[in-house]
Amino acid sequence: MSSENQPHVTQLLELINSGDSAASAQLLEMVYAELHRLAARHMRSERSDHTLQTTALVHEVYLRLFGNENPVALKNSSHFFAVAAMQMRRVLVDHARQNVAQKRKGINIPLDEAFHICQGRDAELIALDDALKELAEIDEDAANVIELRFFGGYTDKETSEITGRSVAKIRRDWEFARSWLHTRLDETSQ
């Protein structure tokens, strides 16, 4: 998203927060391309037979942000995209949890095939989500950096601008979070 649109996004968010429902449609038009880029990035790391499509992911996230009577109160463009990236991860994790639950419930398949299904991409995504929740309890800043860098696709500099922390702090949080997650995921896979 160009920096020239950021003030306009912030203005539209202020209108939405004050109850202007027409501003939501204007905002979607303005940010759709960037949301689609984020969603495409998320979907590239999903399995090839995933039933959720990029456009559906964008729409689901937008509905989660603005589709109820009490939309999420977003402060500015940076906050909007940070929350959108987090919501994309949550949509994919919810989808993965439903997928794993459906495969476990009432379907008669051989044990070795069931083991393979549960060890697939959905199970990995759920394990990562659980580990990120644990990390957030230990170090919320580090978990936030993972959300923005890994799931949002933002650079160190962009993450710094979004969070208001120095690039050096972002890099330290990134290194800590990656190391912690690697150790935690290794522990759970054994």
Image (cartoon, grey):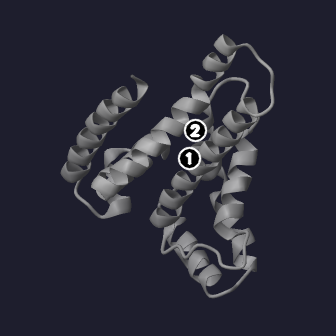
Residue sitting at x 52%, y 53%: 86
Disc 2 versus disc 1: distance between alpha carbons?
Answer: 8 Å
- Residue pictured at 47% horizontal, 65% vertical: 79
Relative to 159, 94 lies left or right: right
Q: Nearer the viewer, mark 2 or mark 1?
A: 1
Label annotation for residue 42 = 2
Q: What residue does disc 1 label?
A: 89
| Farthest-out residue, bottom | 18
The percent coordinates of residue 97 (x first, y second) are 64, 41
Q: Quadrant of residue 123?
A: top right
Q: Quadrant of the C terminus?
A: top left
Mark 2 surroundings within 10 Å by alpha-carbon count, few (fewer than 14), some (14 through 19), many (20 or more): many
Image marks 2 and 1: residues in contact by CB distance under 8 Å: yes
Instruction: Tell me the SS state at disc 2.
Output: helix
The spot of residue 4 in percent (x, y) is 50, 64
Q: Earlier in the sequence, mark 2 or mark 1?
A: 2
Determine if residue 11 is in view: yes
Left of 30 or right of it: where is 148? left
Q: Report x, y in % for residue 168.
A: 19, 49
Q: Which label belongs to residue 81? A: none
Give the answer, above or below, for where 126 lies relative to 83: above
**Is 69 located above or below residue 83 in the figure?**
below
Name the residue located 61 percent from the left edge and 76 percent from the top edge.
12
Count of numbered labels shown in the rendering = 2
